[in-house]
Amino acid sequence: MNRLLLLAVLAAIAYSQNTTPPNSAPVEIPFESVPNFLKLPPDLHFGEVAGVAVNSKHHIFVFSRGNSSGPAYGATAAQLLEFAPDGRYLREIGKNLYAWSYAHAVRIDKDDNIWAIDKGSDMIIRFNPQGQVSMVFGRKKEASDEAEPWKRVTPPRPAIDGMFRQPTDVTWDLEGNIFISDGYINSRIAKYDKNGDWVKQWGGPGKGPGEFSTPHSIVSDAKGNIYVADRGNRRIQVFDADGTFQREIHIDVPVPPGVKPWMGNQPNEEAAAAQNGAPWAICITPGPNQFLYASDGFPGRIYKLSLEGKVVGYFGRSGRQPKQFGWVHEMACPSENELYVAEILNWRVQKLTLHPE
């Protein structure tokens, strides 16, 4: 076999083994939803499920706006629950916690510490694996000062080191530095070192590189790069651990015909385009070959991407049935083909198994 023929054969073999050729269009990924996976006690109910995370033992943690108390508006709505790998209910963590106000996200770090992000109290709480509070970030307004939520004003009030205004999520780099997305009002990223000492911030309201409009979810990859779901700007921004802008990712998969929103009027073409691919939740799979998953509110799909931003595939749509979604607010992806998705509108967590071709 001559050299040119050998090279052609090797190239053909390499191409046949590449499941996502560089120029291939994204495909719809077959998947299934495990019915009634999480088993709640008879007297316990989810509210809007804001967060879901999985630890190294494959225990599932759900941060729900359940256990509400108080008036219809301004209620205390945050409850952190733990489930076994088979879906059995194990315990509630942080019952009656001072920071509980309005659940937003839950994450698990490499040491299986449990991090709860409460948008209503402007606080981020770290629990050790035993469920005891081990670190506190932020401070809620005092009841003695007639506390009320932060108001949006123009121009925005300056952000304050160590204080938050409706934070949304947390992640870590390879050295254990802590990155908090802060969030609905400050529109910035706050960085602490592994001991909880303030390091820096970057960002602010805007549309340019390194600026944000509701940084809603934040994750890191195996190299320590930081990915921010910049929902209001319909993009994912990528930074190094020092906050230096690297690139941005846009998800542009056409909206299929006939898809209806979970609620509200059918959006016109312009409104649908503004929502399509706008990232609500993101997660990155472990292992040497990592993938990025992202969800949107309408048409209610989940997208699988390479870390460079190429859309490999997508699945699901808005709705109330299994395999449909009502505002996926947070995702956990412990492996490439196993996902847990927390839904605000359907008050549930779905365990999804993907079957890519």
Image (cartoon, rainbow, N blue to C red):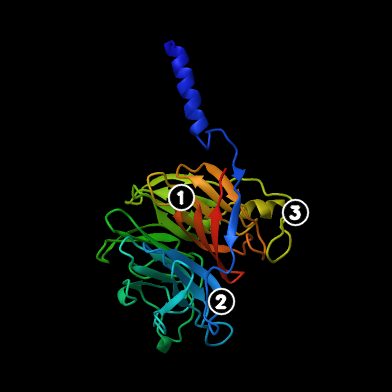
Query: Which of the marked residues, 3 or 2, is nearer the chain's N terminus?
Result: 2
Drawn side of residue 79 relative to residue 125, left or right? right
Location of the N terminus by quadrant is top left
Residue tagged by mark 1? 237
Q: Neighbour class for label 2 at 10 Å: few (<14), some, many (≥20)?
A: many
Disc 1 versus disc 3: distance between alpha carbons? 31 Å
Location of residue 139 (image quadrant): bottom left
User: Residue 16 in the image: x percent, y percent?
Assistant: 52, 30
Q: Residue at x 26, y 62 (%)?
A: 194
Horizontally, residue 10 falls left or right of residue 267, namely left
SS type, badge 2: loop
Nearer-the-camera pick, 78 or 160: 78
Residues at circles 1 and 3 in contact by the CB criterion of under 8 Å: no
Q: Nearer the viewer, residue 307 or 271?
A: 307
Residue depicted at x 31% and y 72%: 128
Residue occupied by mark 3: 258
Is residue 167 or residue 109 the one in the foreground? 109
Name the residue that disc number 2 marks. 47
Q: Mark 1 or mark 3, which has the lower sequence index?
A: 1
Q: Please indicate, yes or no, whether residue 291 appears anywhere in the rendered image.
A: yes
Distance from label 2 to label 1 (Cα)?
31 Å
Q: Position of residue 180 (x, y in %)?
A: 38, 63
Extreme residue toward the top, this view: 2
* Amino acid type assigned to the residue bearing label 3 in the image: Gly
Amino acid bearing label 1:
Gln
Label 3: few (<14), some or many (≥20) within 10 Å?
A: few
- The x, y position of residue 127, in whole percent, is 34, 73
- Earlier sequence position, callout 2 versus callout 1: 2
Question: Quick one: SS at disc 1?
Answer: strand
Q: Is residue 325 left or right of residue 212?
A: right
